[in-house]
Amino acid sequence: MNEKELIKIASKTKYHGLGNNCEKKVSVKNRICGDEVFMGIHHNKDKVFFETNSCILTQASCAILADNLKTFNKQNIKSLIKDVESFFLKNTKIPNELKVFKKLLIKENKNRKECIVLPLKALDKLLND
């Protein structure tokens, strides 16, 4: 993916900022690089909002996740995280639920897989804690 396209995805601000609209908030931290994602769920439970202290890849992943929230089922988020790892480590196919991340799920990002899955980990914590 070229840098301009990545910047365009990461700069989407529709769901950026937690404010007072969120009834539940969580934070997760990437143990490798220190990126942080703060995520909150809107009171009607069909929207998530986020803030990050992160690289552009994590920010883009958050924007994609927030834009496509209805694609994800709270029961299968943990398995989707494992699917991303399998994609990078074992060259498996990307499951349909993760097709929205196809621009980020490229071999060049293999060493940054934790950045890509961090928002999924935040969503899992938000919905399943």
Image (cartoon, helix red, strand yellow):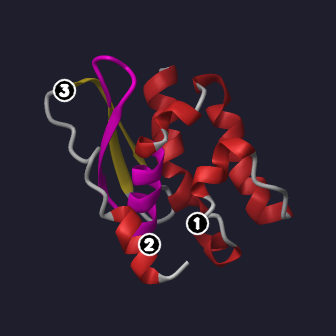
User: Of callouts 1 and 3, which one flags the residue occurring earlier in the amino acid sequence?
Assistant: 3
The numbered disc on residue 7 is none
Stretch in magenta: 41-65
Residue 21 is marked as 3
- Residue found at x 57% / y 65%: 104
Identified by mark 2, the residue type is: Leu
The answer, for residue 55, to whether it is visible in the render is: no
Q: Position of residue 75 (x, y in %)?
A: 64, 23
Residue on which the image places disc 1: 103
Q: Looking at the image, do the residues carrying marks 1 and 2 touch, with CB atoms under 8 Å apart?
A: yes
Q: CA distance from mark 2 to mark 3?
A: 28 Å
* Residue at the (26%, 53%) spot, across then down: 13
Q: Is residue 87 left or right of residue 9?
A: right
Residue type at mark 1?
Lys
On residue 6, the disc is 2
Q: Secondary structure at mark 1?
A: loop
What distance separates the C-alpha of mark 1 from that of mark 2? Answer: 8 Å
